[in-house]
Image (tube, rainbow, N blue to C red):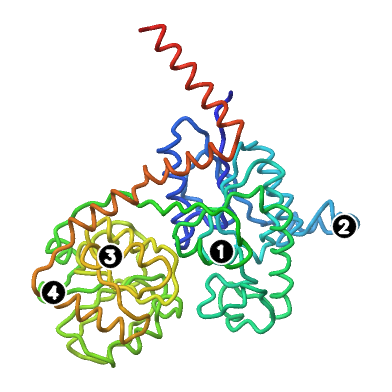
Amino acid sequence: MSTPTIAIVSDHETAGGAAVATRRIEASLRLGMPDWRIARIAFFGDENEHVGHRHILQPCESPLAMQLMRLPRKLMPSRFPRPASRAFAERSLKQALSEIRPDVIQLNNVHGAADWGWGPWMVETCLQFAPVVWTLHDMWSFTGRCAYAYDCERFVAGCDATCPTANEYPRLALEQIGPAWRERRTLYARHLQRLTIVTPSRWLASQARRGLFAEHRIDVIPYGVPAADQIPRREARMALGLAADGPVLLLAAVDLRERRKGAHILRELWSNKPHCPLTLLTMGSGVVPVADSPIRVHSLGYVADDRTKTLAYAAADALLHPAPVENLPNTVLEVMASGTPTIALPIGGLPELVRQGVTGWLAERATSDGLSEAIDAALRAIEFGVDMRATCRAVAMAEYSLRLQGERYRTLIEGVSPLIRDAQRSESGTTSRSAARRG
C-alpha cells in the first residue's frame, strides 16, 4: 500500500482558538503517524506558513479575471460560479480533494468561511472522496447558527427565528436560522452513519447528543498541548516589567470586551468584592474596567508571539478565566503546561481541566459572585504559599500531550478506514515475519 494520506480541512489556519487546536491536531498526527502524508485545506491561509501539500481556497480574482469571466458566468452560471458562493467553494474543494486523493478527511470548523459559501454541505462533498472524521470545536454543527447556545435550548428540538443571539458571531438572518437547522437535520439523516464525530470535551459530546447527533457514537479526544518552557516567575515578571510584590492574575482573550469571554462578568466582579493588592496582567484588545485603584492593570495588548505568551503564563500566579460558555480552552491547557493554575466558572469543559487543589480553583456557581469567591480562595492559597506548578505540568503532560492526542487519532482513523487498517495489519505482519526470519 502507498503512504496513507490525511486531508485536514479547516476555515482558518492560524486565527482563533479552533485554528490553533486544528494545527495541534495536525502536529499530533505528524507525531503519531510519521509514516503518513498529511495535506491541509484551508480558506484563510497565512502566507508565512511553509507546509507541504497545502491548499488555500480563497476566492480572489483580479479585475481582469472578473472582466473576462463576466460573460461565461452569465451564460453558464453552474459551470463558472461566482466567488463567495457555495458553487464556487464546492468546486474548489472538489478540485483540492481530487489532487490530494486522501484516505481519510479530518474536518474541523467551517463556519469561519460561511460568507464565502462554506457550510454543512461540505460533509457530503468530503464523503464522496473518503471517510470523514469531524472534530467539533463548538456547537455550530448542531445548532441553527450559534457557536454556543448559552441558556437557549432551541437547538434540541429546532432552531428558528426566535434565536436570542442572532446578532452575534456567526451571524445569520432570522429567516434563515430555521432552514439552516433543518438542512443540518436532513444532511445528517442521510450521512450520519458514515460520519465519525469527535469532540475535545465530554461536555461538548453531551450537548451534541442532546441535539442532531442524538444516539450517534461520539469519540472524545481531548486537545493536546506542546510542552512549555519553564521560566522562573521572578524572571518572567522582570522581563514584562511587572512589579515584584503581590499576586498577579492573568486575563487572556483576543478581545477582552467580548461577552463570550466574560466581559459582563468582569464588569460586575470587582464591584462585588474588591481584591487588593493585586495586579491584573491582560493579553488581548480592549480595556478591563477596574474601579479599585489598588488593583493595578498591566496591559500587554494583543499578543501574537509565543515568547511573550510564555512569559505571561510564567509571570502569573493564576489565570483568571471568566468565560460563561466554553469547550476545552487552549489557554487553560497552555497555562497548565507552563505550571500555572486557573480560576474558572464551572461551565462547559472547564471542570474537566480545572481540578480543585490540583490544577486550580473552580467556582461553586457560574456567577460573578461565585467567581469572586473562587478568586478569594485562590488569593488566600497563594498567600499561604500553595504551589500547583508541579501538579499542573504533570496533568498536562500525562493527559493532554500532543503524542497522546496523536495516538488516539491514529487508533480512531485506523478503525474508520478498513483499507488503512488492513494495510497496517499486513505491514505489521510482514515486519513480524521478517523479524522472525532474522531471528
Q: Is residue 278 depicted above or below 393 in this figure?
A: below
- Amino acid type at image mark 1: Ala
Return the disc, 4 or 3, that comes first in the chain's sequence: 4
Residue 70 in the image: state x and y as whole percent.
83, 59
Q: Which residue is mark 1?
A: 208
Q: How many marks?
A: 4
Distance between mark 3 and mark 1 Cα atoms: 24 Å
- In the rendering, which numbered label is found on residue 355? 3
Q: Nearer the viewer, mark 4 or mark 2?
A: 4
From the image, which quarter does the C terminus lie in? top left
Q: Earlier in the sequence, mark 2 or mark 1?
A: 2
Q: Secondary structure at mark 4?
A: loop
Return the disc, 2 or 3, that comes first in the chain's sequence.
2
Are circles 1 and 4 on residues that touch, CB within 8 Å? no
- Separation of disc 2 and disc 1 at Cα? 45 Å
Q: Residues within 10 Å of mark 4 (few under 14, many from 20)?
A: some
Mark 1 or mark 4, earlier in chain? 1
Residue 20, numbered circle = none
> Where residue 404 sits in the image (x, y, percent)?
37, 44
Is disc 2 placed on a helix, strand or loop? helix
User: Which mark's residue is nearer the viewer, 2 or 1?
Assistant: 1
Cα distance, mark 1 to mark 4?
45 Å
Q: Give the side of residue 436 with respect to residue 182, left or right.
A: left
In x, y percent, where is residue 384?
8, 73
Which residue does the numbered mark 4 point to in the structure image? 243
Quarter-wise, where is residue 294 in the image? Answer: bottom left
Q: Label 2 sits on what residue type?
A: Leu
Alpha-carbon span between mark 4 and mark 2: 66 Å
Q: Are marks 4 and 2 in contact (CB under 8 Å)?
A: no
